Image (spheres, rainbow, N blue to C red):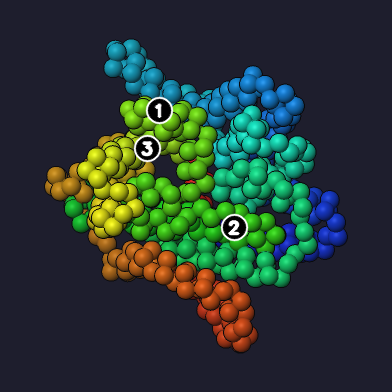
């Protein structure tokens, strides 16, 4: 069930009705747990086998770790989860790479992967694996000391608003809330509904309409000229933002309706003035996870500059591979790592010449970084979106004006250009609009006379029906 689908709306209405009738915490917890299992099973019931096995084994390891804080149990948890993630997500990549290397060495290799390798990637495995690992690491570090019951553990991992594609949470952000599920609050229902509708608009009206434009352009990379290559890549940058931030806002809104507060996952990333700032605004909970559990564990900045830069590069490489089982994703992470290393060296250069970070001169110079950051990030999206390195190189070369288009060129209709232009306008207007609405407060909307609100509701539903794109799964469901 996609959050933006009619099926999910009916499903959530039923869940909400049952939740409203619940009179005790056990009843509310049972409803949320049952809803989460049904929601996950709606994609493919077989996914539940791996999920339940992972929940049971990881809880056993967590319980032993909480009791002893022995490093052996932490290592067991890390090895188990990384092995499972590797087997289900990366075995195909490993075999493809092995076959390619063997072919170069002159050995006879199969033309394609063996059929037994083509396992379906369990939905959300990257996300729920990170959720369980974060608890174990926090327990070992002494940052989480409260014991978690198996019910709370299961709710924490499977809570359906965030299970499939985040936000990625630590136990301290969710477990206590799930252990104290309260009756519905009118204020939470109202605010959560507004947040959900905002995310729905991003997904249905923008992301789903940008998707076919991106597909059309990227399906013929050899025919692209400079303008089309930039249009297609810009459209994808907008599509993935509206798709993923829309999902995150819908997840946050759904959780808030049920009385659970989830952290913000996006903060206007395309107004960033450096790639470091971009990662402070894009997929914030993943950036934080990689920083807290990978970069810092490698030594972070508490070492020599070369070692610190190597830690940064390795973190981004692994972050790229986390997104997908392909070397194009690793290269996407490599590029971001390269940008972050360059930014770190730039700050070092500022320090050497006496330019203080955060000072007036540094602030003035940082504004020059806004268009540069947009361009640099756009180049990385090519490797995220293209289905092969050959296609990615073709699009990148066209963006740099290094090649001439071959074959029949892609033609963009005026309405397609209008969709891309509208998306770009929304990206830069959104921070101003949200800031104004936040100052006014959500209660302002509920003071609008009901007939006017009713007309607005009708117009929004009509817009989604008439202009909404085909309901597609969220991009990050593949990761």
Between residues 251 and 212, which one lies in front from this camera angle? 251
Can I make out residue 392 in this image?
no
- Foreground label between 1 and 3: 1
For the residues labelled 2 and 3, the Cα–Cα distance comes to: 27 Å
Residue 123, image x, y percentages: 57, 41
Between residues 436 and 18, which one lies in front from this camera angle? 436
The part of the image, by quadrant, that contains residue 409 is bottom left
Q: Can you say whether 304 is above or below 5 in the image?
A: above
Pointer 1 residue: 303
- Looking at the image, is mark 1 or mark 3 earlier in the sequence? 1
Residue 135, image x, y percentages: 64, 36
The label number, if any, that marks residue 252 in the structure image: 2
Q: In terms of secondary structure, where does tag 2 sit?
A: helix
Residue at x-position 67% and y-position 21%: 70
Pointer 3 residue: 333
Q: In terms of secondary structure, where does tag 3 sit?
A: helix
């Amino acid at each position: 069930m996609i959050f933006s689908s009619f099926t999910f709306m009916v499903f959530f209405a039923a869940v909400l009705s049952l939740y409203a009738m619940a009179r005790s915490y056990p009843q509310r917890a049972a409803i949320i747990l049952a809803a989460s299992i049904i929601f996950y099973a709606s994609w493919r019931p077989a996914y539940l086998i791996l999920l339940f096995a992972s929940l049971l084994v990881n809880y056993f390891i967590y319980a032993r770790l909480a009791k002893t804080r022995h490093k052996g149990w932490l290592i067991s948890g890390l090895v188990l989860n990384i092995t499972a993630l590797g087997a289900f997500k990366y075995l195909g990549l490993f075999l493809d790479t092995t076959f390619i290397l063997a072919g170069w060495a002159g050995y006879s290799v199969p033309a394609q992967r063996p059929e037994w390798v083509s396992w379906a990637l369990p939905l959300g495995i990257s996300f729920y694996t990170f959720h369980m690992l974060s608890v174990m690491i926090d327990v070992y570090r002494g940052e989480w000391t409260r014991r978690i019951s198996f019910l709370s553990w299961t709710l924490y991992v499977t809570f359906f608003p965030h299970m499939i594609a985040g936000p990625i949470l630590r136990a301290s952000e969710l477990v206590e809330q799930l252990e104290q599920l309260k009756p519905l609050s009118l204020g939470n229902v109202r605010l959560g509904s507004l947040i959900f509708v905002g995310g729905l608009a991003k997904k249905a009206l923008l992301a789903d309409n940008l998707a076919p434009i991106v597909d059309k352009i990227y399906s013929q990379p050899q025919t692209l000229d400079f303008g089309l290559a930039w249009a297609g890549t810009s459209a994808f940058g907008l599509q993935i933002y509206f798709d993923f931030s829309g999902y995150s806002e819908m997840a946050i809104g759904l959780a808030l309706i049920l009385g659970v507060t989830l952290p913000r996952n996006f903060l206007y990333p395309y107004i960033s003035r450096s790639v470091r700032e971009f990662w402070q605004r894009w997929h914030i909970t993943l950036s934080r996870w990689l920083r807290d559990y990978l970069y810092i564990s490698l030594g972070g900045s508490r070492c020599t500059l070369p070692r610190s830069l190597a830690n940064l590069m390795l973190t981004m490489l692994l972050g790229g591979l986390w997104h997908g089982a392909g070397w194009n994703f690793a290269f996407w992470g490599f590029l971001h790592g390269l940008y972050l290393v360059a930014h770190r060296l730039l700050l070092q250069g500022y320090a050497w010449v006496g330019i203080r970070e955060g000072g007036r001169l540094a602030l003035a110079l940082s504004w020059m970084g806004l268009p540069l950051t947009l361009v640099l990030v756009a180049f990385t999206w090519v490797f995220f979106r293209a289905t092969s390195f050959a296609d990615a190189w073709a699009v990148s070369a066209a963006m740099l004006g290094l090649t001439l288009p071959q074959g029949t060129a892609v033609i963009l209709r005026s309405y397609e250009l209008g969709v891309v232009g509208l998306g770009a306008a929304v990206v830069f207007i959104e921070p101003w609009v949200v800031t104004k609405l936040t100052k006014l407060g959500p209660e302002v909307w509920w003071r609008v006379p009901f007939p006017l609100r009713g007309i607005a509701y009708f117009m929004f539903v009509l817009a989604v029906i008439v202009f909404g794109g085909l309901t597609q799964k969220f991009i990050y469901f593949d990761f």
